[in-house]
Image: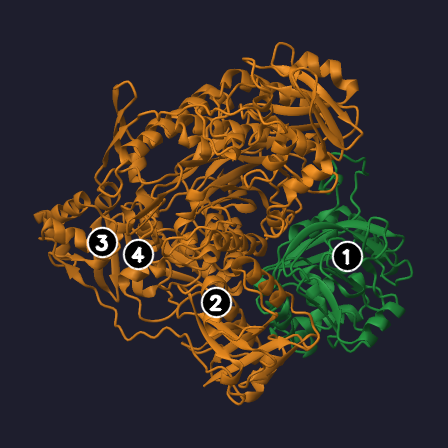
Amino acid sequence: MAKTVKAIVISGHGTNCEREVAHACRLAGADADIVHIAELLAGRVDLNDYHFLNLAGGFLDGDDLGSAKAGANRLLHAQVAGHADEQAQSLAGQLKEFIAAGKLVMGVCNGFQLLVKMGLLPAIDGDFQQSCTLTNNDGGRFENRWSWLQIDPDSPCVYTRGLNGLYLPIRHGEGKFVTDKPETLQQLEDLHLTVMKYADCDLHPTMDFPDNPNGSHASIAGICDPTGRLFGLMPHPEAYVHRTHHPRWTRETLPEEGMGLLLYRNAVNFIEKEL
Amino acid sequence: MAWRIVVGLKKDVKDARGERVRREISEHLNIDLHSVRTLDVYTVDATLSEDEVEQAAAGPFSDPVIQEYAVNQPLASRFDMLVEVGFRPGVTDNTGRTAREAIQYLTGRPFAEGEAVYTSTQYLFTGLTDKVIADKIVADFLANGLIQHWTILSADELDPQVGVPVSIPRVVSDTTPTVRTLGLELSDKELLDISRQGMLALNLEEMHKIKRHIADPQVIAERQKVGLGVELTDVELETLAQTWSEHCKHKIFSAKIEYEDEHGNRQVIDSLFKTYIVGATDKVRENLGENDYCLSVFKDNAGVIEFNADWSVVFKVETHNSPSALDPYGGALTGIVGVNRDGMGTGMGARLIFNTDVFCFASPFLEKELPPRLLHPRRIFEGVVEGVEHGGNKSGIPTINGSIVFDERFAGKPLVYCGTASLMPRLLHDKPCHEKQVLVGDHIVMTGGRIGKDGIHGATFSSEELHEGSPVTAVQIGDPITQRKMFDFLMIARDQGLYNSITDNGAGGLSSSVGEMAEDTGGLELHLDRAPLKYPGLQPWEILISEAQERMTLAVPEDKLDAFISLATEMDVEASDLGLFTDSGYFHCLYEGKTVSYLSMDFVHDGVPQMVIPAKWEPKELSEPDFVQPEDLADQLQHLLSRLNICSKEAVVRRYDHEVQAGTVIKPLLGVANDGPSDAAVYRPLLDSFEGVVVSHGICPSYSDIDTYHMMACAIDEGLRNYVAVGGDIDHVAGLDNFCWCDPVESEKNPDGQYKAAQLVRANQALYDYCVAYGVPLISGKDSMKNDYQIGGSRISIPPTVLFSVIGKIADARQAVSMDVKQAGDLVYLLGTTANELGGSEYYAQQDELGARVPQVNAEPALLRYRTLNQAQQQSLIASCHDLSDGGLGVALAESAFAGGFGIQVELSYLDVDHPMREDKLLFSESQSRLLVTVPVAKKETFEALFNGQSCRRIGQVIEQPHLIINGLHGQNLVHASLEHLKQAWQAPLQEM
């Protein structure tokens, strides 16, 4: 009998998409709990009890210091009650243990920004130093539109296995992906960690607005770590799990299930087989 | 000491924000700068070590990949002019608050009382050396002097060692809390002076009523028992001013109106609200009988209707006009987060599911000189849009429906309507969730934000016209994150049963929220000194009436108080016990144990005298314009599509997250290129169900210039027409009315008050007539009655405007219909009769004419049509459906065609008309209750059979060729236009906004 895949979605302090992320996890076959960060900090909920951590979209602390900056600071420094060993005293420490155990983490939009700004993505050298960032869209404004995304078939990303392209909504003001130096970008490309790129409708990566909605370097929309188990992306897969989410569902023949759900299915399959 | 941390982008990193500012300065002010770069400044006024400040600067305050920082020295270089804009003391600084929390996490130490972080922004200009121009840029675009201050330095004025001089906008107050008392044995003039100078908005009759009350020997005796003298305290006077304000008491809608119609018939209307609004709803509910789906109407912060057996839908629409006139960003932001609290404060509280917004502005391209204190409409536009963007997006609530209406008179006061729908369980702990009851002995608990001077006199301010002395403190800035944290907490507290009642703090602050809740028990004991303050120095009366945002008031039973407070603390939300709900019969406030207010509940709530307002209706002498049919109707159509009231609002819609929560099924933008204009929104609030909420609205102020009766009828019909177009169930629908009027009370400075009052009466009569005819109950609403501008000899009154919002249900959202044509070959039908009704139309306005024949609504055939349309939708007979409104058939055809990417060919001779008329009138008439429908050929018979006997004409066909082809009455071609051109005309005007 297949084991139960347990997913956790962290909420609180400005996270907004926890309900639909949990819904997507459930549709993909996981048990999903929405857990307020206060529960984690109080030590009542233990990350170790889960296989799949979801950092959902939103505006942590209003993104007031830059997207997810204050949120990253909280995870790095807020104390978890009732833990003796140093690693488990901060949520960041617990998160690193979770990652070391080979479990899955997906950050969407603000969750992606959080992973990057904590240095958890791409973590090429495993040193958790921030090497990339997500900053203001070139247009200087928040944008909500649907984007075509080309998938790197050679990526180690466990979420995108078997996929060539996706069509998903983006909804952000700070989605422009930038690396600290050209070598980092080169490394990301060489290791096929640039999982997902903004593309035209023929799935060719593009720098042209609006297909590339924010001016991301190398059209990057999502990246993974070298294990492929940590994945962050600006587009919202949880916002396309049924055909009625598609902006043209009233005029196109579409499969009942939305494309975004495929990412969650891949995650659940991976956990069932390999964890 | 204070530290200054400056953060900027590294060299070679694109400054998208600076570039946007440069572009906007060019567009708004026609000043072309070479470049604009931006820096963020954090002034940290706290005891920290150098190392800690360094950590904060390197950590949460800056991004090592793209940013650099400097501590206590300037970062600015390579500029001609530097401008730093910061907040004035006491203005909400959300980023400053987040920065303080970040430092606290970092150091593990809380800030001491009075310590804070203040943020400001530096703008570095190149290509500008004139300080006067720099000041103009700041004053007219970058900053708002009401809430911000700024420093301008040229390159040689910046000391490279020191940087911009440190300024700390700390609120400094050496006042000690005192309670003043006032004797009211004064002349009429003196009484009015007290009202005017105190921003109380109390009229003479009301002042007299208070004077008499306070002189009553029995009242004096009772007051003496609690230690008060014969004079009224300032706390009491302010309480009465708030509670009796137009904003809170709706005195005009409750007034006795002496109405005389055009035939000299006289009628006394005892409360427009009771007679027409409540009256219509009572009648509709009576007609619905067992099928009545209303659960809570008019009595709470929002209306509640059934959604299904387990859930109900809550809806409220508010206006926030006056604050948005002074500070468009803060006003609109506060508007949206304020109406969010209405949903949260209805019944036992509800989960917010979506927002709607409708704005009325003057043209952003207005080139006239504006009178003093009015901001340019372009600034209003930009600020309001950004405020609603931040309010909605950051709160995680999708904005799914809205519109923008333009009229030059809205320069006098912009209208900002913000709506929120929420979802609550039908039953909570076995009791109806839409009901609540405070019990004697419950604690008064305030939760969320702290109290400051913000928003003091907001309620009384909005009860007046905008004038020279309009107070700065009426401006507030919302804080979506503090509110979001509070809502997360309250949903858990609700489900754990930790409170008996909840309401929001809006207009009037605690005086209103606690006062209204205390009507359940008949008394309250409120300790004002226990309320948490943002900074010291507030007077007791200020604490009571402050409209500081993000606060809810709850009634928490004694045995749940500890659990409530500790849950709040754990979730990082402040909650304070301020006293008790009692049955004493008194509105009793204390400060440090001493009574500062002791008014009987009856006097506070029922003491306000009923106004008497004369109203006289005289139809204006209007005539139809006399002009020959223009030769080129394609050109007319193209120009209509470019008119502000018709053109695409895509640039605004894209800035609103309209998909968060994953429920939006019919989105605001749709069609082959995701950019067509949707008629209404369909939203699935439950992710595991296909039942949908449908929301739409109608608004047509231009018809008010002819007759507000028909304006109202048309707004109702437009709202319902949009609603049924997407598939909303006409038999499960509710309406909300939001009246925005110009002052209807005649006075020296308002000589045509009687006419405006009569316009109000007529609009209400139509509201009654058409809600009853359509079977639409009204569930909530709001009025804003002083939308005038008066400074010196200059008076601008807005056109009487009603937003009619519609909310209801679709049983299966998969049967929803969108407005874009779907495939070549589909048949094009027009439902409804076209009449020569172009008075107040966009087409006449395009010829600079008003006209006389305003569209009139014939509800009986329209209702049948809407019901039949629902059946056709449920049987999947319809490929597309689009309502006809501004610009009539011509505009609807163009929009449906270019949204769908297929052409349409129609014959005007096939139209169902009541009288023969000219082709331009056929094409652009705004006759109501009409819908443009396309039907696949295979469904033709079934569709036509369904509409047998009704006004339903096949007028053409969807064609492969991407052109709109319209043939005239004799079969001759009138319009042959490429969709690309039409769409371009429609998209261009506001594309860059």
Give the letter of the green chain.
Answer: A
Please give the name of the residue rendered at 32% of the width and 30% of the height, measured from the top-left corner.
Answer: B272
* Amino acid residing under circle 1: Asp
* Amino acid residing under circle 4: Glu
Between the residue at mark 4 and the residue at mark 3, the CA separation in whole angstroms equals 13 Å
Q: Earlier in the sequence, mark 4 or mark 3?
A: 3
Between the residue at mark 1 and the residue at mark 3, the CA separation in whole angstroms equals 58 Å
Give the letter of the orange chain.
Answer: B
The subunit carrying tag 4 is B
Q: Which mark is residue B138?
A: 2
Q: Residues within 10 Å of mark 2 (few under 14, many from 20)?
A: many
Q: Earlier in the sequence, mark 2 or mark 4?
A: 2
- Residue tagged 3: B196
Q: Is residue A269 above or below residue B737?
A: below
- Residue tagged 1: A208
Q: Residues within 10 Å of mark 3 (few under 14, many from 20)?
A: few
Q: Are marks 1 and 2 in contact (CB under 8 Å)?
A: no
Q: Are marks 2 and 4 in contact (CB under 8 Å)?
A: no
Q: Residues within 10 Å of mark 1 (few under 14, many from 20)?
A: some
- Callout 4 and callout 1 share a chain: no
